[in-house]
């Protein structure tokens, strides 16, 4: 199976309002709710692709209960979340019906105790025994050491399980030192890590910091990969109109799916960028349009890139 | 005991953010959560004043469970909520740390079935047997007939229990026909009901529609009462700086407390306006500052009003 780790899981709530006006009162016309956090989203896409997936991380309190109840309804995803005494966070996305813009409110997440962090590490080691690949995803909740991802990466590598890391800020800066097989930053995370706003240069620089390969997600411009086998740019056929929520998570799912199947890099990138584009095109935020995905698989342009000057 | 009815209970969530910017992503720095809906807020204030209070209405789903767990922690409030198959709504108040402004997002509430509405009416009749006064508060959830408050008012009057009605829109327009003993609109609700923006004229007009007495809450200008015993204006000593959240619910609690104790109208108004003002002054939204309340009791100016021309 493929293992995804989400230390800061979330119950993702989406509110539709006719128009969001600061300091006004709004009737929410539509409420949707689903289990979230990057690794949970990645797992949902992997399961839809037919992979066996196990989700681990933390869940606790009444929100954690709702999250686990909802997760149990997702076919193909196994819940191996570790209980915490604190309460799992909510995120609220307020979608403005007029502009289509989304205002995001993210709760901080529960404080994790030392004992809970130890219990997680033990559960993680056990899960690795049957994992073909692992993704370490998202922010760290309070109480988890900032070097957590470096440690979890080393544990996986020692167990012979390839690791993909998708996080930001200090967790990314420290995590890359654990030498993950694949690093998946977006343009902003890449610039924050390397100080460079030139994507190819920054991607190469990120790789030199310890990652086996770096795949930068560049929004409408697709993805840029610097790997031991070569450098590629993978681009969808046209400007995509739709909702980019979850596009990065679908990209990770595509990379992980290809990693688990040991596909050559250009095929991994094709799958990842097609999934990401099919997520933008889906009417439901964070889901991918399967027909669009199948069709896009034949239309992703993967081209070799020269070294940055 | 005093009975408060909240057909559309809510879990009230407050988020503090440094500054709310539409279409941006925000880390919430502080999350608070408490059982809400007007009648629940009124009950909390009544219990703090030393009254025995019972809360009824509907609660269901995971949010309903959280609400009931939290309600059980409030001393002096008895939970007599009726279960529904749907899920109790959340409200999210986003407080901007820079401007202090609050952006409110209210979920619509669960759909109530015919059988659930019948079960509630039966529970309500039973509870009236030991009630000294009842308050019917807030919006109606989907599925509850728009004339609900008129029916509940008649049931209470038939049982000899005085009724206070605090709602808005069609529920108010239809509810007043049940002849509640006290109607508590704010300036906006009063204008919507009567078409008049002149408070005294509108208050007198509202009373002619069937209420025994009408107490209009006028924010910083206190309250205006048109009753069978006379007309009064009750005004706090000075412009109050603070958070007006819950000030209307505290006014209702003060009126209800005076109604249950059969106080003369000027004393009821003094208590109600002092409580309301002490709620604005409290650092915690929706709670009242007890020391301020005791002190304000001696400083509310209650003056007789002439008839509107």
Image (spheres, coloured by chain):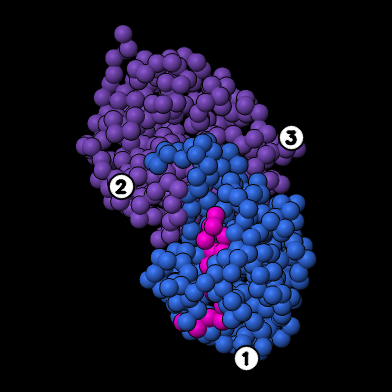
Chain colours: A blue, B purple
Could you say whether the residue bearing mark 2 is in a helix, strand or loop? loop
Q: Which residues are magenta?
A: A209-223
Q: Is B248 on the left or on the right of A35, as rendered?
A: left
Residue A42's place in the image compared with A117, above or below, is above
Q: Choose between B15 and B240: the one closer to the eye.
A: B15
Alpha-carbon span between mark 1 and mark 3: 61 Å
Could you say whether the residue bearing mark 3 is in a helix, strand or loop? helix
- Image location of residue A287, percent across then percent down: 67, 54
Q: Are marks 3 and 2 in contact (CB under 8 Å)?
A: no
Earlier sequence position, callout 3 versus callout 2: 2
Could you say whether the residue bearing mark 1 is in a helix, strand or loop? helix
Residue A295's place in the image compared with B188, above or below, is below
The residue at which mark 1 appears reads as: A158
Residue at position x 50%, y 39% from top?
Answer: A99
Q: Choose between A203 and B132: the one closer to the eye.
A: A203
Residue at position x 54%, y 38% from top?
Answer: A97
Q: Are marks 2 and 1 in contact (CB under 8 Å)?
A: no
Tag on residue A5?
Answer: none
Tag on residue B99?
Answer: 2
**Circles 1 and 3 on the same subunit:** no
Question: Looking at the image, is mark 2 or mark 1 nearer the viewer?
Answer: 1
Question: Looking at the image, can residue B71 be seen?
Answer: no
Alpha-carbon span between mark 2 and mark 1: 52 Å
Q: Is A53 on the left or on the right of A20, as rendered?
A: right
Q: Choose between B82 and B12: the one closer to the eye.
A: B12
Crowdedness of circle 1 by 10 Å Cα count: few (<14), some, many (20+)? few
Q: Quadrant of the C terminus of chain A?
A: bottom left
Alpha-carbon span between mark 3 and mark 2: 45 Å
The residue at which mark 3 appears reads as: B114
Indicate whether residue B93 is drawn in magenta. no
């Amino acid at each position: 199976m493929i293992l995804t780790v989400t230390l800061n899981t979330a119950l993702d709530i989406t509110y539709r309002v006719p128009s969001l006006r600061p300091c006004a009162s709004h009737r929410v016309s539509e409420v949707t709710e689903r289990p979230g956090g990057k690794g949970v989203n990645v797992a949902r896409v992997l399961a839809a692709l037919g992979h066996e997936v196990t989700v681990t991380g933390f869940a606790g309190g009444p929100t954690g209960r709702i999250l686990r109840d909802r997760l149990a309804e997702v076919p193909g995803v196994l819940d191996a979340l570790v209980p915490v005494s604190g309460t799992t966070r909510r995120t609220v996305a307020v979608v403005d019906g007029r502009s289509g813009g989304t205002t995001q409110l993210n709760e901080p997440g529960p404080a994790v105790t030392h004992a809970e962090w130890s219990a997680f590490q033990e559960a993680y080691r056990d899960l690795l025994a049957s994992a073909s690949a692992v993704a370490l995803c998202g922010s760290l909740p309070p109480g988890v050491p900032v070097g957590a991802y470096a440690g979890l990466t080393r544990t996986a590598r020692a167990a012979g399980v390839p690791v993909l890391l998708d996080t930001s800020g200090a967790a990314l800066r420290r995590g890359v030192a654990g030498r993950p097989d694949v690093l998946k930053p977006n343009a902003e995370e890449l610039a924050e890590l390397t100080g460079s706003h030139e994507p190819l240069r920054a991607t190469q620089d990120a790789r030199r910091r310890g990652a086996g390969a770096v795949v930068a997600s560049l929004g409408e411009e697709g993805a840029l990969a610097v790997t031991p086998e070569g450098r590629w740019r993978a681009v969808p056929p046209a400007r995509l109109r739709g909702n980019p929520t979850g596009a990065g998570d679908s990209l990770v799912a595509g990379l992980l799916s290809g990693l688990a199947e040991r596909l050559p890099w250009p095929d991994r990138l094709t799958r990842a960028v097609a999934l990401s584009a099919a997520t933008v095109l889906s009417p439901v935020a964070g889901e991918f349009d399967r027909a669009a995905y199948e069709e896009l698989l034949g239309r992703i342009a993967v081209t070799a890139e020269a070294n940055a000057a």
